[in-house]
Structures are given as C-alpha cells and as structure tokens.
Amino acid sequence: MGERTTEVTVKKKNNVTHSYTVQPVTSAVGQLLGKFLLILQEKENEFGRRVQKDLLEPSNVVVQASKSGKSSDEKHRIFLNEVLRPLVGRKFLLFLDCWKTQADLTKFRAVFPNQNSQLLIFPEGSTGYIQPQDISLFRSWRYFHKKIEHHIHINRTEMTMNDRQYFINMHSVIHNQLSAP
C-alpha cells in the first residue's frame, strides 16, 4: 500500500529536486567497466574552491559539476578522455544516444584520432527500447539507490542525503556492487 503524496520539510527546494547524471561504460557482454562520470547540479558549472578541497573522489568516479546536473559538450569531452579512453584499445565499437552533444563525430575523432573505432548512434526516440543501459543497467542502479535510501530512512540513520559526498559515495558503492562478477 502506498501513498499519493509524501510531505517533507527541507531547507531548500533544491534538496528534493537535485538533478544529476550518471554516465557509466559497459562492455558488449553488459559488464560495468572501470570508472563512471557523475555530474552533480551546482549553482555554477564547477565546484567552489572549498568544496573541491573537501571533496573525496572514489577511484571509480569522475565527479563534475554543472548548473543543470546534466551533461554538456565540455562534460562529454571529459567523459571521453577520463572515463572511456583508459578503457578502450585501438579498435572498439561505441554506441551512443542521438543527442547532439554525444553524437559529434568531429569531437569523437579528435579524442580518438588513431583508433580504428566505430561509432554507432541510436535513432531518436529509441532510448527506452534498445539502449542496453536504459533497459537493464539503470533499472538495477535505481533499485540499489532506492534500497540504500530506504535502509537509511527505516533505520533512522543520521545522514544528510542531499550532501555531495554522500551522493558520490552512494553511487560509487552502487557501481562497485554492479561491477562485481
């Protein structure tokens, strides 16, 4: 039995509407690989000096900030260089969304100039039907996320769930668990 609405008290509206992007890499057999990109919503397109100094970045996460919490051309370039580049050899196949920021062949070739790679773009409107991460990985990811937050709530664990570090650590743990053989 559920409820139609849940009322909460928060200091800022952003605490319940915080937006973010998780961008992992999977192999052809569906195995999560190496690192993933996590983009958190911030007032500016970067973390402040104090925040950056105090932020602990787990080894499996590349953390970035943007005003919307969504990816951009600059953030996608970081994904290609810091997340994808260390994982691929000279020859690889990459499936991407038709989103203009990701499907830029010129940018892709600039990052991977000497690789014998192939870029395949999923057609517009096909996200929920044929994109492997949307139909399998992210369902599991959201399941873990809900279970962690449910556990914190049920056990009345004292934790600020809108805290950047909590958020980074939680997604790092989810990635780690879903990467396990």
Image (cartoon, rainbow, N blue to C red):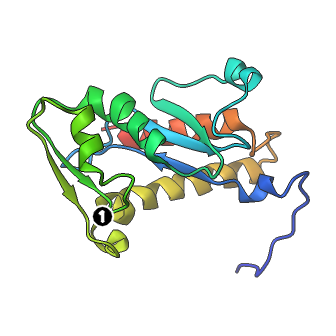
Q: Of all residues shown, which one is farthest toward the front? A: 106
Q: Which residue lies under the disc numbered 1?
A: 131
Q: Is residue 177 left or right of residue 5?
A: left
Q: Between 154 and 66, which is closer to the camera in this rendering? A: 66
Q: Is residue 163 left or right of residue 121?
A: right
Percent coordinates x, y for residue 75 in the rendering: 47, 40
Q: Is residue 87 left or right of residue 79?
A: left
Q: Between 48 and 105, which is closer to the camera in this rendering? A: 105
Q: Residue at x 77, y 48 (%)?
A: 155
**Based on the displayed image, in which of its 4 quarters is residue 88 positioned?**
top left
Q: Secondary structure at mark 1?
A: loop
Percent coordinates x, y for residue 92 in the rendering: 13, 40
Percent coordinates x, y for residue 23 in the rendering: 43, 46
Q: Is residue 56 left or right of residue 21?
A: right
* Image quadrant in which the C terminus is located: top left
Vertical placement of 57 versus 158: above or below? above
Label 1 environment density (alpha carbons within 10 Å; few <14, some 14–19, many ≥20): some
Q: How many marks?
A: 1
Q: Residue at x 87, y 53 (%)?
A: 12
Vertical placement of 106 versus 140: above or below? above
* Image quadrant in which the N terminus is located: bottom right
Q: Residue at x 42, y 34 (%)?
A: 78
Percent coordinates x, y for residue 4 in the rendering: 76, 82
